Amino acid sequence: MSLDQGPEQEQPRIGVDEWVASAEERRARSLASRAQDAIDRAPAPVKLLALAAPFAIFPLLVDSAYLMQVGIDTLIFVLLAHGLNVAVGWVGLLDLGFVAFFGIGAYLYAALASEYAGRHWDAAIAIPLIAAAAAAAGFLVGLPSRRLVGDYLAIVTLFFLQLWLVILVNASWSRGPNGISDLYPLQLFGQQITSLDGYFYVALVAFVLIISFLYLLNQSRTGRAWRALREDELAAELMTMPVGRLKLMGFAVGAGVAGVAGAIFAPVQGAVFPANFDLVLLITVYAMVVLGGAGSLVGVTVGAVLINGSLEALRDADNASWIFYGIVVIALIALLRPWWQPFAVIGATLVFGFVVHEVAEQARPSLVGETVFGGSRIDELIDAWVLLPQDIVTQDGLPTGWTGRLAYIGLVAAVLGLTLVRSRVWRMVGLVPVLYLAACVWANLLIAQPAVARYVLIGALLVGLMAYRPEGIFGKQRVEIV
Amino acid sequence: MDWDKLVQLLVNGVTLGSVYALVALGFSMIYGILKLLNLAHGDVVMVGAFIGWGVIGWLGGAQDPNVAVWILIVLMLLAAMVGCGFLGVAIERFAYRPLRRAPRIAPLISALGVSFFLQNSVLLLFGADFRSYEAFDLVDVEVGISWGPLNVWIIRIIVIASAFVMMAGLWLLVTRTKLGKAMRATAFDREAAAMMGVDVDRVIVKTFFIGSALAGAAGVLVGLVFGSINHFMGFNYGLKGFTAAVVGGIGSIPGAMFGGLFIGLADALSVGYIEDFTRGRLGSAFSDLVVFLILIVFMLVRPQGIFGKPEVKKV
C-alpha cells in the first residue's frame, strides 16, 4: 500500500489519476476499441447509410416470405431497442414497463384502423398521433416516479406493465385474450400496403427517420444533459439541469418510439393479442440493448439484429445445434489466451467424449441407446460422441425423471463453479468435462425444447454480459474512479 | 352486509398477507443491506414452491405419504428453505457481487437475467402445466376452526402460524444475536462496519441465505394453501412482495410484516368487493389495480413507507 519503490511503481494504480488519464490510451490498444473509434469518427450520414444499407438490400437478396417476415420483425425489434435505449442507455432509467407502450401503440392502431373500430385512418395521420399518445402515456407513467431513484422506478414501471396486461386480458373493449383480429392493412397516403416487401420498406423508413431523430437528439443540449444526468444525478442538478423534466422527457421519447413500433407491428400481424406484450418481450429487448451496448446507436442496432436473428434460428432444432456448438467454439476462441489454448481444450474435450462414450458403451449400453433429436449431419456425429441415455425425455421434450433435471442443475452449478477457479491450469482442466456435460445436456434436454432453451440462453447471456462486459459490443467502457 | 363473505375475505387476506410478508421480508433485508432491488426474489419463491412439490412426490404423493403429514410439511419447508437459501447465495455470488461497484442500473439488469433464467429453466425441466400440491388430499378441508361465521381450514392456520413463527425468529435473530448486530451495522454504513471489523461479505452472504430461505418457505406455503404452482407464479408474488416492502418502509422488518398484511388484506378485499363497488364494470382480476394505486399513493405521499425513515442523501 505504501508508495515505496517497487516493481509495481511502473504501472499506475487502478483508479488513481494517472490511470484514469491514460484510460483512452489503454482503450486504443485493443482491436475492438479501435474499430469503435473508427465508427465514432465517421460522419453521421455515412454511419446512417452503413446502418440502413444492409436492410435496404435485404429484400433483394431473399425470396421467401418467411425470411421477409423475419426481416420485418427484426426492424420492429430494432425500433423497440432504440426506444428502450433512450431510457436505459442515455438517461439511465430502468424502465421495466417499456413493452406496455409498444402494446399501447399496437392497440391504438387497432382502435384507428380495424373493422372492429369501424375506422380506417391513414397512417400519415395515425402513426404520428399514436407516437404522441404513447409519449403522453410514458409521460404519465413517469410522473409519479419522477422523484424516485432507479429501483423504485423499476417497481412502478413493472407494475404498470402488469396492470396493462390485466386490463388487456379482462377489459371488454380489448376483447380479452382473444385480441382484436380484424385489423385493416396499413394505408399510407391513400395507398394500401398489402405485401410483405411494402411493410418492410415502411419499417425501414420509420427506422431511418427515428434513428436520425435520435442521433440529433443525442447531439443536442438535451442529449448532453441526459448523459450528465446518467453519470451523476446530483452533480447535474447542481449544474441547474431540470432533472425531473429531463427524466420525463427520456421516458416520453422512449415510449413514443415504442408506440411507432407497435403501430407498424399491428398491421403486419393483422391482429393484436395481450400475449404479444409480455415479460418475455421486455427481457428480449433488454438483452438486445445490453448486448449491443447501451447508449450506442450502432450497438443497439447490431444487438437487436443479432439477438432476433439467433432467436429465430434457434427455433429450429436443426439450426440450433449448429448455432450452439458454433457459439461455444467462438466463445472459447474469444475468451482463452494464448491462441492455442481454445484448440487444446476443444481437442481434449473431443478425446474425453469419445473415451467416455466408449467406456459407457462397454459398461452399460443403455447409456448410449438413444439418437439425437433433430437428425441433421452434425447430430449424427454427435450421436457417436455424447451420452444419450434411453427415455430421458418424453415426447414433448420434458424430462421424465430426475436424471435429466439433475444433469441440468449440475451443469449450471459446474459452469458457475468454474468461474470461481483462479488457477488457469485447473480452469482449463475443469473446462473439458464441463464442456462435455454441456454437450450431453444440450443433446438430451435442450434441443428437445429449442423454444425454451433459447430463452434460458438469453437469461444467462444477460447475467454473463453484466458480469464480464457490461458495455456490450459497442458501448463505451465507463471508467470508474475509486 | 354479508358477514360470512367479509370474514372469509379477511381470513384470505391474512393468509395471503402472511405469505406476502415473508416475501417482503427477504426483499427488504436484501435491500437494506445492499441497497439493491433483488428482482429475482419472486422467482426464488417459485423455485421454493417447486422444491416443496418435489418433496411431496418423493415421499409418496399427497394421497398416501410415507410419513406423517406434519413431518411432511416440516420437511417440505426445510428442503425449500435450504435449497432456496443456497440459490440466493449463488445469485449473490455470481450475479451481484461482480457488480458492487458498477452503476446502479447494472445489477438490476443482471437480476432481470437471473429471473428470466430461473423461469425458463423451470419451464424447461417441468413444463408449463400447473402443478398441484393436492393439499386437499393431504388434510381434510373439514378439519379446522369453526366459530360462527369464521371457518378456517387447518392448512390456513398452519400457513399463518409458520409465517409468524419465522417472522418472530427473524426478529430475534436481527435484534438479539451478533449476526443481527452485524447485519444492522452493515445496513447502516457498509464501510464503517467493515472498519469496525465486520466481515461484510460474509454478512451479505448470510443475509441472502436468510432472505431467500424465507422466500422458499413462502413458496411452499403458497403451494399448500392455494394449491397450484407454475413457472410464472414468482412474478406476482415478487411484485406484491415489493409493494408490501415499499408500503411498510423498505429496509424495516416490522415494516415488511405490516406491509405484507396490509397488501394481503387489500388484495383479498378488492378481489371480493371490486365488482360490487364498480357495479360489475371491473372484475376481480382488477384487484391488481387497487394494489398499484396504493403503491402510487405511497410513492407520492410517503415514499419512505410507514415504518421507514426519510432517506437523507449523503454527498
Image (spheres, rainbow, N blue to C red):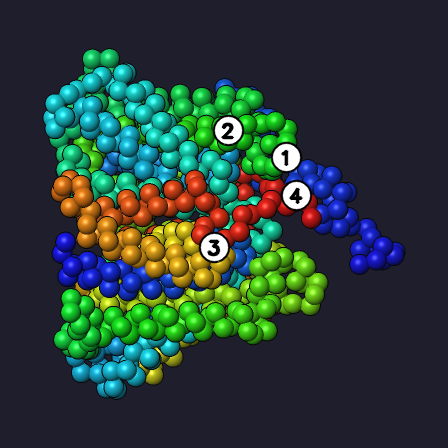
**Element assignment for label 2:** helix
Say which amino acid is labelled 3.
Phe
Q: Which of disc 2 and disc 1 is earlier in sequence?
A: 1
Mark 1 chain: A
* Residue at mark 3 shares a chain with residue at mark 1: no
**Measured Cα–Cα span from mark 3 to mark 1:** 30 Å
Mark number displayed over residue B315: 4
Q: Which of disc 4 and disc 3 is earlier in sequence?
A: 3
**Measured Cα–Cα span from mark 1 to mark 4:** 10 Å
Of badges 1 and 4, nearer the viewer stands 4
Q: Residue at x 20, y 18 (%)?
A: A121
Q: Residue at x 23, y 27 (%)?
A: A109
**Element assignment for label 1:** helix
Mark 2 chain: A
**Residue designated by label 2:** A246
Residue A476: % across, % down: 58, 38
Of badges 3 and 2, nearer the viewer stands 3
Horizontal side of residue A121 vs B254, given as left or right: left
Residue B268: % across, % down: 25, 55
Q: How many marks?
A: 4
Q: Residue at x 67, y 63 (%)?
A: B194
**Residue designated by label 3:** B307
Q: Residues within 10 Å of mark 2 (few under 14, many from 20)?
A: some
Of badges 4 and 2, nearer the viewer stands 4
Quadrant where the N terminus of chain A sits is: bottom right
* Residue at mark 1 shares a chain with residue at mark 4: no
